[in-house]
Amino acid sequence: MSIPQAEIYSGKLFFNSVLPLFKEIAMGTKLGKLFAGKRGVIQVSAFAGGEKWGTHFLLDQGQMTVKLGPHPDPTIDLEFKTLKEFNDFFKGKSKKLPKIRGLKHLYLVIPTFRVLLKMAALLGAANPPAKSEDKILLVKLYFYLLSSGISQLNKCGHPQVSAWARSSPDRVYAWSVDNYPELSAYIRVKAGKTKSSRGQYTRSKPFFTMRFDTPDSSLGILLQKDDMLRSTAEEKLIMEGAPEFGAQIGGFMMLVGEYAK
């Protein structure tokens, strides 16, 4: 049975753009202490048309490395029967838990679920978090997700994004927050190819930057609480580049949200 294209887009986004954020939460919050001194391979996977898709995390003495694709012998594996079950779980449409292979390794199972729950709470939030550190973390997660998500949609052949990438010269589109250099990400596009990166693009000035004055202002737009035109008029959102390119990137941001929400 063929898999609907929308399920494929969602699956690629969750495996290749959302799940890598696991490391940011695991290593960048107090939850990191749960992994201190531990070793193993943590994997989340699903079967898609007879093929196993997955993202895994190599843990070595508390240090974590993200790897796209399945691992041949993970210590624990959160395995979904189908891609739809996987997508529905991460979209919050289903509470059906995956099969847990390696359940005896509770020293990894429990921390893994705690991080996934934290990630779900942050990315599923309708309103900005109350704590300042959570606001900063959420902006970082969104910037990473959006830049990577747009690139992933191009790589898996989304017609709208792929047409844009094919016709584009060498350009860089960026997201940033004033006075928070850690809150930045970008995507580089050239002749059909795209590559997303975290941090600031320093080789030259990006072709277009969606720049916010504060983390709160960025969350107002990212969580669709604030009007973009009003934020621009009040200089909470500064678009460095032609407005039509801002509208274009904004449309792609919405696409990522549709498939990953």
Image (spheres, rainbow, N blue to C red):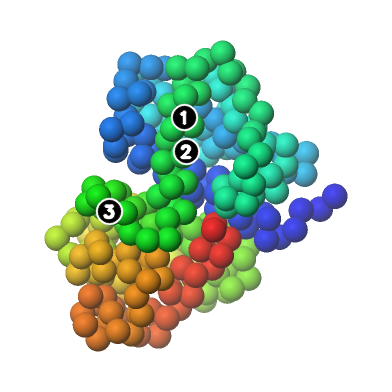
What kind of residue is marked 1? Thr
In three-dimensional space, the C-alpha distance between marks 3 and 1, rounded to whole angstroms, equals: 24 Å
Please tell me whether residue 37 is drawn above or below residue 133 in the rendered image: above
Secondary structure state at the residue bearing disc 3: loop
For disc 1, the neighbor class at 10 Å (few under 14, some 14 to 19, many from 20) is many
Please tell me whether residue 212 is drawn above or below residue 247 in the rendered image: above
Residue closest to the eye, 218 or 226: 226
List x then y, in percent, for residue 89: 61, 45
Instruction: Residue at 57%, 34% (x, y): give it.
Output: 44
In three-dimensional space, the C-alpha distance between marks 1 and 2, rounded to whole angstroms, equals: 6 Å
In the picture of the structure, the residue carrying the numbered disc 3 is 130
Location of residue 20 (image quadrant): top left
What kind of residue is marked 3? Ala
Instruction: Residue at 35%, 23% (x, y): give it.
Output: 34
Secondary structure state at the residue bearing disc 1: helix
In the picture of the structure, the residue carrying the numbered disc 2 is 116
Tag nearer the camera, 3 or 2: 3
Location of residue 145 (image quadrant): bottom left
Question: As drawn, is 219 to the left or to the right of 145?
Answer: left
Question: As drawn, is 108 to the left or to the right of 27?
Answer: right
In the picture of the structure, the residue carrying the numbered disc 1 is 112
User: Disc 1, disc 2: CB below 8 Å?
Assistant: yes
Please tell me whether residue 55 is drawn above or below residue 183 in the rendered image: above
List x then y, in percent, for residue 26: 36, 34
Asked if residue 204 shows in the view, the reply is: no
Residue closest to the eye, 107 or 4: 107
For disc 2, the neighbor class at 10 Å (few under 14, some 14 to 19, many from 20) is some
Instruction: Residue at 57%, 52% (x, y): give it.
Output: 91
List x then y, in percent, for residue 12: 59, 51
Question: As drawn, is 196 to the left or to the right of 91?
Answer: left
**Label whose residue precedes the other's in the sequence (3 or 2):** 2
What kind of residue is marked 2? Leu
